[in-house]
Image: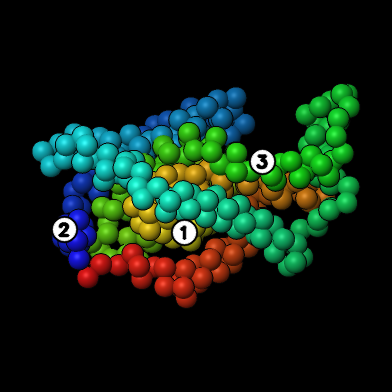
């Protein structure tokens, strides 16, 4: 065992600093509710401010993490150590980090795509893989009277091929969430053990979405059921992105995996019949059909021993 490994193992055995966790959660949740107040008082998700405020909300976990690290824990960590503990730096081993970024992006896209085809196999949605009528309706609404320059099949293929690029672009926003959840909270909870840390982080992540879930975001269920659906979805997906974080000892695979998941979220609209809505407990990217795919991914991680490699003696 190297000195670095021994140091990490000793760090993992330190008790959870529950006071810091509590401050982080209160800040992240409080700021999220504060940012979304304008949506609650006027317009809801139909408000013209919704897109901007949802993007701002994504950075509230990062703000909470930075406040805890640099203000609450200022006597325990210096800036360089904080950057390292949050997984922002150093980027080594480079090969492993790049490989896990690729796995995170590809895995997240595959999860969403398989969820869409599984929903069709279960008879929950009808696909149109010939004329792409659902996508045609979206294009027509956006283009108006202008002609579409390429065949729809080519446009659909381009949309799918460009998903990894979307993952990189979305990373600018998803880092706001990931810096909080996988950057700070997950490592802070690791003294509890790998599984408790992964599951608690995922559940907290889901509950944090409550201000917008209760407005009908994602599942069109503005109630407790919607919050429960979100918690289950983020907990399952959180195992995968949490594994990326712990396996790489870097935040970036989680950031871009999350970005890829968001980029692929509208995939079903590309291949379904016109009029299909993906905002339902079954068809949402975090809906119960995709839970089945996520559970299979977790099963693969377990069977291949990947999660055991995250444990410490």
**In the depicted view, which residue is nearer to us: 92 or 100?**
92
- The answer to whether 168 appears left or right of 307 in the picture is right
Residue placed under numbered mark 1 in the picture = 240
Q: CA distance from mark 2 to mark 1?
A: 29 Å
The residue that appears at 89% across and 47% down in the rendered structure is 131
- The answer to whether 209 appears left or right of 92 in the picture is right
127 relative to 33, above or below: below
Residue 220 x %, y %: 62, 47
Q: CA distance from mark 2 to mark 3?
A: 43 Å
Q: Quadrant of the N terminus?
A: bottom left
Locate residue 42: give its quadrant: top right
Q: Quadrant of the C terminus?
A: bottom left
> Comparing marks 3 and 1, which lies closer to the viewer?
3
Residue placed under numbered mark 2 in the picture = 3
Residue 26 x %, y %: 29, 42
Query: Element at badge 2?
Result: helix
């Amino acid at each position: 065992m190297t000195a670095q490994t021994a140091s990490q193992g000793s760090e993992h055995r330190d008790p959870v600093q529950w006071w810091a966790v509590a401050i982080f959660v209160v800040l992240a949740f409080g700021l999220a509710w504060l940012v979304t107040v304008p949506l609650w008082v006027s317009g809801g998700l139909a408000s013209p401010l919704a897109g901007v405020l949802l993007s701002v909300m994504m950075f509230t976990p990062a703000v909470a993490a930075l406040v805890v690290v640099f203000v609450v824990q200022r006597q325990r960590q210096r800036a360089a150590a904080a950057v390292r503990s949050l997984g922002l730096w150093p980027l080594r081993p480079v090969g492993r980090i790049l490989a896990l970024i690729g796995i995170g992006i590809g895995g997240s896209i595959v999860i969403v795509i398989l969820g869409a085809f599984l929903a069709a196999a279960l008879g929950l949605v009808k696909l149109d893989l010939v004329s792409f009528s659902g996508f045609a309706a979206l294009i027509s609404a956006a283009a108006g009277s202008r002609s579409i320059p390429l065949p729809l099949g080519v446009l659909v293929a381009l949309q799918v091929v460009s998903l990894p690029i979307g993952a990189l672009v979305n990373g600018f926003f998803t880092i706001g969430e990931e810096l909080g959840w996988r950057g700070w909270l997950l490592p802070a909870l690791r003294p509890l053990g790998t599984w408790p840390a992964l599951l608690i982080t995922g559940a907290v992540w889901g509950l944090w979405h409550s201000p917008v879930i209760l407005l009908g975001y994602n599942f069109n269920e503005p109630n407790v059921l919607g919050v429960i659906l979100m918690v289950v979805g983020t907990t399952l997906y959180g195992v995968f992105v949490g594994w990326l974080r712990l396996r790489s000892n870097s935040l970036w695979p989680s950031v871009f995996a999350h970005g890829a998941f968001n980029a692929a979220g509208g995939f079903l609209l590309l291949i379904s019949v016109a009029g299909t809505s993906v905002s339902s407990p079954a068809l949402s990217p975090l809906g119960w059909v995709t839970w089945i795919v996520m559970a299979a991914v977790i099963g693969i991680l377990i069977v291949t021993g990947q999660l055991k490699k995250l444990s410490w003696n």
